[in-house]
Amino acid sequence: MESGERFGSASVEPTPCRVVNVGTMRTRLAAQFLPPRRKDAKKNLINFAFFFAPLRLCVRTVLLALLFAGVVVAQDPVETIRIDSDLVDLKVSVLGFPPNTPPPILSPKDFVVFEDGVPQDISFFAAADTPFDLVLLLDLSGSNSKNLKMIRNSAKRFVDAARDVDRIALVTFTDHPALYSTFSLDRKKLKKTIDEMDDAIGGTNFWDSMEWVLRDLIPQGSGLRRSAIVVMTDGVDNALPNVEGPGSQIPFAALLSTIRNSETIVFPIYLDTEEENVKRRDTSRIAYAMAREQLAQIASVCGTQMYKATRLSDLDSVYAQVVRDLSTVYSIGYNPTNKALDGKWRSVEVRLASRSDLFARTKRGYYAKLRS
């Protein structure tokens, strides 16, 4: 599915409600099973997936019980729960407003959704100020590990710039991911954790690390909060042709399919390390060209853009732009008028009804379900 994804637990109304935040519960419970951070985390974190599988089943059971029991307890901001098995879910970015002015607040009547050219009725809408679960995924492989202080400082500025309602998790990767913080609203604690990021050694298994975040870190099926991954990398996985090292186990095509079918949106930041590594003959220009194309594909299926940091010192301004763009992302859902379960491609377009000064960007379409 490349634009709207049909998912099984969603609400036809943007129903704000206070419930037990199972996403928070999951990360707190999961922390009990995690190996220690830093060096031990780097050696052992990938084993987290084996502990997490039974936990997911338990959390889903707890969530269902809470929803049907109508339990009313919460410490986090109001969440939105969506319940509808046929909903096509779109994450829509609104762009074009002046950089020094606050983003406009839009409502459902400002958007028009088309599927294969046919207007659709919007049945679910979450405003841009709806909270996110954000994962900051940082590539510390290769030459990046030598610039750890600058990467730390930029990451802390990202934490400061993020909205107070957004929870942030911190993951680094070389040839495997290392979890430094699960989702948290505690900015002071997050920045302290960033200071504890240590030197990394190893190749670049970017695809595996991204797939691990999508599969095991992002809360799946809870219906609470929206989720996004902000990844800083040059994108050169060791699995690319003529790049030394074993590389990721998951093929890029499979990772892209996972991203398409996920409700999580990815904001890729391309950190340009080409000249340095080509001069050292560590990596070819062909590999870099392929890496940029893959990051652009990830951005395309998510309806975002590939940001570029020519040097590490550019990260501050790029992170600020990403945070600003996150504040313009709306969630829009509709029940398609075409009910055919034929597995065919459905093109999707979102327009702004009365704001010619702005434009909307989302995924280009999706594949309909195939009748089983």
Image (cartoon, grey):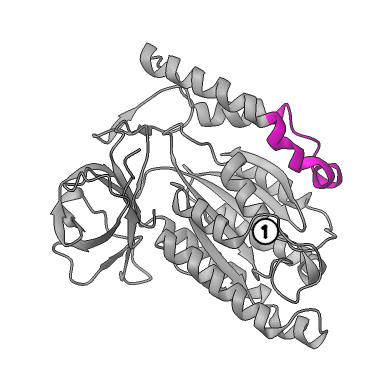
In the picture provided, is 191 more to the left or to the right than 7?
A: right
Magenta stretch in the rendered image: 31-51
- Residue 341 position within the rendered picture, expressed as x and y whole percent measured from the top left: 27, 44
Q: What residue type is labelled 1?
A: Leu
To which quarter of the image does residue 84 belong? top left
- Between 143 and 216, the one lying in front of the other is 216
What residue do we see at 71% from left, 33% from top?
Answer: 50
Residue 221 against residue 121 in the figure, above or below:
above
Seen from this angle, which residue lies furthest front?
372
Residue under label 1, please give it: 138
- Residue 135 position within the rendered picture, expressed as x and y whole percent measured from the top left: 58, 49
Q: How crowded is mark 1: few (under 14 residues within 10 Å), some or many (20 or more)?
A: many
In the picture provided, is 354 more to the left or to the right than 368?
A: left
- Between 269 and 159, the one lying in front of the other is 269
What residue do we see at 78% from left, 52% from top?
Answer: 197
Residue 208 against residue 296 in the figure, above or below:
above
In the picture provided, is 202 more to the left or to the right than 266?
A: right
What residue do we see at 57% from left, 56% from top?
Answer: 255
In the picture provided, is 51 more to the left or to the right than 350?
A: right
The secondary element bearing badge 1 is classed as: strand
